[in-house]
Image (spheres, grey):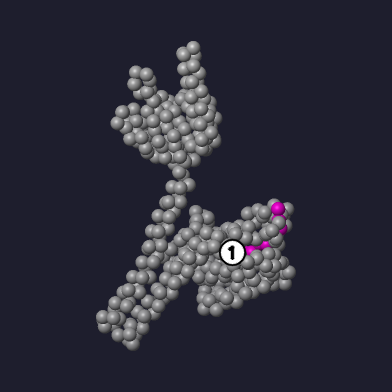
Amino acid sequence: QERTQLIASLQESERRWRSLLEHVRLVVVGLDRQGKVEYVNPFFLELTKYTEAEVLGKDWFENFLPNSQQKSVQQYFQDILDPDFQPHYQHSILTKSKQEKIIAWNNTLLQNVQGEAIGTMSIGEDITERYAIERMKDEFTSVVSHELRTPLTSIHGALNLLSTGLIQPQSERGQRVIGIAADSAERLVRLVNDILELERLESGKIRLSKQPVNAAELMVKAVDQVQVMANRAGIKLEVSPQAIESEIEFEADSDRIIQVITNLLSNGIKFSDRGSSLWLTVELQQPEEPETTSPPDPNSAMILFTVKDQGRGIPADKLESIFGRFQQVDASDARKKGGTGLGLAICRNIVEQHGGKIWVESTVGEGSSFYFTLPENHDN
């Protein structure tokens, strides 16, 4: 009877542990001494999209790890079989579609009744997103530091020349140095303002004030804001007559949409040659009649804005990345033209908060067309 109770107790304990392993939102993998998979829990299968039959009995290192990490992780495994092993490490695993997932592992050595190592049980947390966020923060800090240092160095150098008397402020050279310092200070203010603006948008601290707006009125206001800039650059701004005459109305934060259009127009002016043209159009797209490579929302008619230039164009591998923070086709040239590398990231955030999309199509040497869509009635 005592033996029966002991067996029942062991079975109940096993049932509880198995229930825990099968419901926990962590990756659980059991390996034998040779590194063959003996157990995986449902969350592992959910994360990797494998079936249990595709995993059990397979070599863990050859089948589920990136080639670049197989040897190092195999060495970790051998270390775990040693009584003085280090139980914590992290590495990537491969999903069925060969996507890498970064897992932080806590490993336990399994032993038989004689105390001999028979395998391992590893419980891991998927830290892929956390790792990406931390890496993005590091990159952001690095880029911001560089972008801030450049104008600050220029300002510091100019003030040093003037304060030590090496250059007289009233001289031609002195005036030029003062001008450089003023431009650097203006760029610094723009950069800080853009960083703060993007942070407020992404954190949801800026609430959109949506009102019924007229597309033509927004376009006219945006063009008015960049007209002087276009005149100085020798760029002809053209707004389609149909757009001006249209009675397209929708719900949006008018100031923010003007900000998006103005930014796209400004970029077109900066990176176009003197004497070229810049076109601004708007049209109403019905769901069943997509007219561009990016399909409209099937649940609503969409307002499509287009800004088309005759500039240098954008390489195919940059068409998506330019909407990220500090992502520019030519960063050094963009700095000369007063860019901060945050304008398109701000535009994308504003458009997406309205329930729309923004993208670009381009041919190097011929020009680019920036598109963004907004729902006719976002509440729908």
- Residue 23 visible? The answer is yes
Q: Position of residue 78 (x, y in %)?
A: 33, 29
Q: Position of residue 334 (x, y in %)?
A: 45, 66
Kindly identify the residue that appears in the image at 45 percent across and 68 percent down: 192
* Residue furthest to the top: 1
Q: Is residue 130 above or below residue 187?
A: above
Kindly identify the residue that appears in the image at 42 percent across and 27 percent down: 31
Is 136 or 104 nearer to us in this picture?
104
Kindly identify the residue that appears in the image at 33 percent across and 82 percent down: 173
Q: Position of residue 251 (x, y in %)?
A: 68, 64
* Residue furthest to the front: 1
- Residue 369 visible? The answer is no
Is 8 or 153 nearer to us in this picture?
8
Q: Quadrant of the C terminus?
A: bottom right
Identify which amino acid the numbered label 1 is placed on: Arg
**SS at badge 1:** loop
* Residue furthest to the bottom: 170
Q: Position of residue 200 (x, y in %)?
A: 52, 63
Q: Is residue 197 left or right of residue 237?
A: left
Kindly identify the residue that appears in the image at 57 percent across and 76 percent down: 225
Helix, strand or loop: magenta stretch? strand
Q: Is residue 281 above or below residue 319?
A: below
User: Where does the magenta region start and end?
Assistant: 299-307
Question: Which of the 4 quarters of the picture holds residue 366?
Answer: bottom right
Whether residue 302 appears in magenta in the rendering, the answer is yes
Whether residue 166 appears in magenta in the rendering, the answer is no
Q: Residues within 10 Å of mark 1 (few under 14, many from 20)?
A: few
Q: Check disc 1 and report the residue beneath it.
A: 207
Number of numbered callouts drawn: 1
